[in-house]
Amino acid sequence: MCQHRSIETLQVGEREWNFGVVRRLPIEASRGHPSLASLLERAPYAALYGRIQVRVHLNPVIERERFAQLIGHALNPAGCTHTLLSDSAMEQLREASRGVPRQAGRILRNAMRLAVPKGLNHFPDDLLQRAIEEVR
């Protein structure tokens, strides 16, 4: 996977790439790397850019209900069967993350790190606010 490589590494190795071997590279390389995605759009990388089969850009989830569903959906596989966030905390999370799932995940991970030593099974508003401040 290329997502952990720097852009410079890709630029140096472009002459050595065997495009038959790295067919799925662009899909994995551009995930989460806007600067790499814009680099691949340039003329020297036209052949590589042409091999991208799927382009996905996730927009922020602005609507309250959809954001709450997104957070609930993300917590279910982790084994969370109860509500961790009050409605006010969910709104706080949505506003702080601007609806960006990756940013919401960072805040929630930080909140979990703060809640576990206290033995909490939910995130009070003040704890979530502290997690938000630490992420910024």
Image (tube, rainbow, N blue to C red):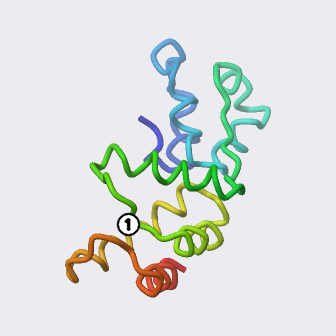
Residue located at (69% from left, 21% from top): 47
Residue 78 x, y percent position in the rendering: 30, 49
The single residue placed furthest to the top in the displayed view is 20
Q: Eyeballing the image, is 17 above or below 136? A: above
Answer with left or right where residue 53 lies relative to residue 43. left
Q: How many marks?
A: 1
Is residue 105 or residue 119 the one in the foreground? 119
Is residue 55 or residue 72 the one in the foreground? 72
Q: Eyeballing the image, is 50 above or below 124? A: above
Name the quadrant of the N terminus.
top left
Is residue 7 or residue 89 the one in the foreground? 89
Residue 64 x, y percent position in the rendering: 66, 58
Answer with left or right where residue 135 lies relative to residue 121. right
Residue located at (57% from left, 30% from top): 26
Q: Residues within 10 Å of mark 1 (few under 14, many from 20)?
A: some
Q: Eyeballing the image, is 31 above or below 122? A: above
Q: Eyeballing the image, is 84 above or below 132? A: above
Residue 48 x, y percent position in the rendering: 65, 25
Residue located at (34% from left, 57% from top): 82
Indicate the secondary structure of the residue bearing disc 1: helix
Q: Quadrant of residue 10?
A: top right
The single residue placed furthest to the right in the displayed view is 43
Label 1 sits on what residue type?
A: Arg
Residue located at (64% from left, 19% from top): 53
Residue 101 x, y percent position in the rendering: 56, 55
Name the quadrant of the C terminus.
bottom right
Q: Which residue is mark 1?
A: 109
